[in-house]
Structure formats: C-alpha cells, structure tokens
Image: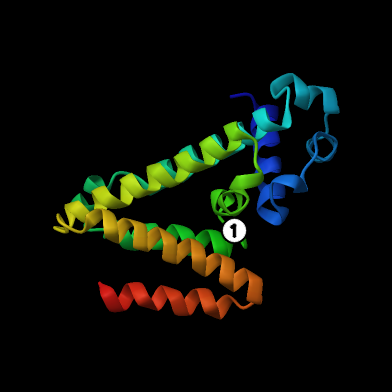
Amino acid sequence: MENKETEILETAERMIQEGGYNAFSFREIAKAVGIKSSSVHYHYPTKADLGVAVASYYTDKFIAHLGDPVDLMAVGKDPIRQYVAAFRDAFIKDRRMCLCGLLGAEVKGLPNSVAAQTKLFFVRNIEWLTHAYEQQGHTTDARDNALRTLSILEGAMIVSNALDDVDVFYDTLKHFDETR
C-alpha cells in the first residue's frame, strides 16, 4: 500500500473514532494529509468505498496485532489477557474508541458495504476469541465466552466515553481478573 493511501486510511480512521462515520469528509482528509481532495477520490471514489477500506484496514491491523492464540500460549501468554490489553491500550493509552464499535452503533444508517465490513470485524473477533477460549480448555462454552468478552469490552468503552469517566473502563477490566 502506498504511503499516501495509508495516511488517508489512518486519517479517516482517527476522524471516525472521534466522531463517527459522518465526522469525515474527503476535503478534511485531503487537508490533513496534504493532498487534493481529488487524490482521495482517486483511491476511494465514494465515501462508502473509503469506509469499507478503513474498516477492513482497522480489522486486519487489530487481528494481526493480537497474533495467534496458539502462538501466544506457546510463549506463556494468556490470549484473553492479550485481547483485553489491546482494548485497554487503545482506549487508555491512545485515547481512541474501537472504530468498528462506533460503526456498529451506527450500522443501521451506514451504507450496506460499510455495514458488512463492520460486521466482519465482529465475526473475526468472535472467531479469534472462540479459538483462544478453546485453547484454554473451554470447549463447550468458548463461543459464549467470546461473545461475552467482546460485548463487555465494547460496552465498557461506550459507557466510559459517554460518562467521560475512564474509571468505568478500569472497573470493568477487573471483571476479567476476577473470572480468570
């Protein structure tokens, strides 16, 4: 992927994380990246095309950052703790909401292609978590645990952000220490 194309995706990602799908325009992205609006359109003809690309880029980056649960366990790391840490780092260190969590909240008002790509984030995360729980011996309830973990973390981000109280997120993370 070209440098400018990556800059476009990362700029759009940040703008969506700060204000949702309707919080960005091609003109604003072009200005932030230092290119003409027509250059953004060259890579992404429509806003929906850009939305799909951003959600796909974010999903791939997130899953790649997690690594494989089997590999994590092989080096003595708990994949669920690694997953929780990824959310914690994004929200606490980077001060960013989960991009697809935000898009998920808006899914009924998104173009179908963006909604489908957003859904794929959740599908891939549930698959990753299910695999992680299975590796830890949770063979009968792995998918339920995966759904619960993802829902708790996404919900904690939203509630903490809405209340402008980071302690809500921290308090929620204690749940994972108590249930492990």
Q: Is residue 77 left or right of residue 138?
A: right
Q: Which residue is mark 1?
A: 97
Which quadrant holds the N terminus?
A: top right
Residue in the image at 44% along x and 47% along y: 122
Q: Is residue 23 above or below residue 45?
A: below
Residue in the image at 67% along x and 32% along y: 48
Residue in the image at 63% along x and 69% along y: 161
> Which structural element holds mark 1?
loop
Instruction: Answer few, some or many: residues within 10 Å of disc 1's Cα (few below 14, many 20 plus, some between 14 and 19).
Output: many
Color style of the picture: rainbow
Q: Is residue 134 left or right of residue 68?
A: left
For this orientation, the residue located farthest to the top is: 42
Amino acid type indicated by mark 1: Met
x and y, in percent, of residue 70 in the image = 22, 46
Q: Nearer the viewer, residue 172 or 111?
A: 111
Q: Is residue 19 left or right of residue 136?
A: right
x and y, in percent, of residue 56 in the image = 53, 35
x and y, in percent, of residue 68 in the image = 29, 44
Q: Is residue 106 above or below residue 178?
A: above
Q: Is residue 171 above or below residue 44?
A: below
x and y, in percent, of residue 55 in the image = 57, 39
One can see residue 117 in this view = yes
Give the total number of marks visible in the rendering.
Answer: 1
Which quadrant holds the C terminus?
A: bottom left
Residue in the image at 34% along x and 72% along y: 176
Image quadrant in which you'd find residue 31: top right
One can see residue 72 in this view = no
